[in-house]
Image: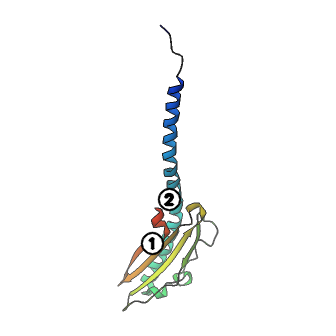
């Protein structure tokens, strides 16, 4: 009886093709996962601004009094150069008063850099009495980053 000392060429080709298929399907998923993890910096910096707006509205009572970094009382988190994936966060100046006291709409926007596909994260807050209801939009929604 003859003893086998290894794998045949066909067996090796099958293993290599299976590994190739696995790598081919896993690489895009891994890349998207990395982009999504990087984009959390943009989201967390936007959450910082959102929280500051909420505190400002609680103190001043109107969104029109909280539509810039100076009025909110914070420094632009993207201005210090320490952020790795965030290009900028800005108030768009789209603050409206709405009807009656304690109402209005404000919008601010954050943009990631090329490492996160230049995706934007837009938060629009609508003041309803003393509660701000926030909605998220921007290119990050279609890209699956937020």
Q: Residue at x 50, y 55 (%)?
A: 32
Label 1's element?
strand
Kindly give the residue lying farthest to the bottom in the view shown: 100
Compared to residue 22, the image places residue 48 above or below, namely: below
Residue that mark 2 sits on: 36
- Quadrant in the picture for residue 104: bottom left
Q: Is residue 84 visible?
A: no
Which circle marks residue 137 in the picture?
A: 1
Total number of numbered discs in the rendering: 2
Which circle marks residue 29 in the picture?
A: none
Taking the image as shown, residue 12 lies to the left or right of residue 124, namely: right
Label 2's element?
helix
Do tag 2 and tag 1 residues touch (Cβ < 8 Å)? no
Q: Residue at x 47, y 7 (%)?
A: 1
Residue 129: % across, % down? 35, 85
Q: CA distance from mark 2 to mark 1?
A: 16 Å
Compared to residue 48, the image places residue 13 above or below, namely: above
Residue 57: % across, % down? 44, 83
Compared to residue 94, the image places residue 36 above or below, namely: above
Q: Residues within 10 Å of mark 2 (few under 14, many from 20)?
A: some
Observer-nearest residue: 93 or 8? 8
Kindly give the residue lying farthest to the top in the view shown: 1
Q: How is the image coloured?
A: rainbow
Q: Is residue 118 visible?
A: yes
Q: Residue at x 38, y 87 (%)?
A: 103
Residue 38: % across, % down? 54, 59
Kindly give the residue lying farthest to the left in the view shown: 129
Taking the image as shown, residue 76 lies to the left or right of residue 55, namely: right
């Amino acid at each position: 009886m003859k003893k086998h000392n290894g794998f045949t060429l066909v067996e090796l080709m099958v293993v290599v093709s299976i590994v190739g298929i696995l790598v081919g399907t896993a690489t895009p998923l891994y890349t998207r996962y990395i982009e999504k993890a990087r984009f959390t910096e943009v989201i967390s910096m936007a959450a910082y601004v959102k929280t500051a707006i909420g505190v400002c509205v609680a103190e001043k009572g109107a969104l029109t009094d909280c539509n810039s970094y100076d009025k909110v009382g914070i420094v632009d988190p993207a201005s210090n150069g320490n952020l790795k994936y965030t290009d900028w966060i800005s108030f768009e100046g789209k603050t409206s008063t709405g009807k009656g006291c304690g109402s209005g709409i404000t919008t601010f926007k954050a943009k990631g850099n090329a490492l996160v596909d230049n995706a934007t994260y837009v938060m629009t807050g609508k003041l309803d009495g003393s509660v701000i209801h926030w909605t998220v939009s921007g290119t990050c929604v279609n890209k699956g980053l937020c």
